[in-house]
Amino acid sequence: MGLKSSEVIEALGLEPLPIEGGMFRRVYADDYSSAIYFLVTPEDFSAFHKLTSVEVWHHYAGDPAELVLLNPDGSVTREVLGTDFTRNERPLSVAPVNTWMAARTLGEWTLFGTTMAPGYTPDMYEHGDRKSLLKAYPQAAEPINSLTRE
């Protein structure tokens, strides 16, 4: 890999993403869709949140990452985004509408992209509350405790 997260952050002009965590930059937005770069490190992660629009996650560079989805039906999905297809890593994952999601790197850093259609607006975002999530998804205690901010 060779690059450090600080080099990627500088090269792409990433800034801290308030509330959710991670580093990001919006690279596209129109009336129909939006796209961001998004980087996480072991010290920072994408905290549990849900959106009123589908969010598509794309692995771009760095180490693989875990995407945890707490589905409306009560089930939990854990996917690894990456490029080692022989280890069941995938370069793309879809977080359906109203699905709680959170992500963390499984190494030094991971660069994602996310796209949404319709495009992101702040009123689409709901931040996860640890106590409520644990009550609804007790089988996911480890990722909920690790990937919430309070």
Image (cartoon, grey):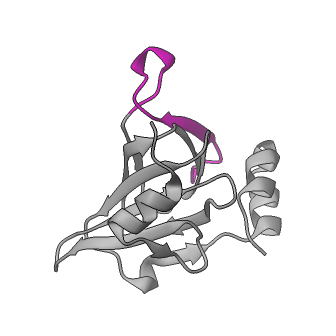
Tell me where residue 76 appears, x and y as whole percent. 63, 42
Compared to 47, does 58 lie above or below? above
Residue nearest the observer in this picture, 121 or 18: 18
Tell me where residue 27 appears, x and y as whole percent. 26, 70
**Residue 73 falls within the magenta-colored stretch:** yes
Tell me where residue 63 appears, x and y as whole percent. 51, 38
The quarter of the picture where the C terminus appears is bottom right
Quarter of the image holding residue 132?
A: bottom right
Tell me where residue 35 appears, x and y as whole percent. 28, 66
Left or right of residue 43, residue 56 in this image: left
Residue nearest the observer in this picture, 33 or 110: 110
Compared to 146, does 52 lie above or below? below
Start-end of magenta stretch:
71-90
The quarter of the picture where the N terminus appears is top left
Quarter of the image holding residue 129?
A: bottom right
Query: Residue lying farthest left?
Result: 31
Whether residue 99 is visible here, answered yes or no, is no
The residue located at (80%, 46%) in the rendering is: 142
The residue located at (16%, 78%) in the rendering is: 30
Compared to 62, does 121 lie above or below? below
Whether residue 17 is visible here, answered yes or no, is yes
Total number of numbered labels?
0
Query: Residue lying farthest top?
Result: 86
**Residue 30 falls within the magenta-colored stretch:** no
Compared to 98, does 15 lie above or below? below
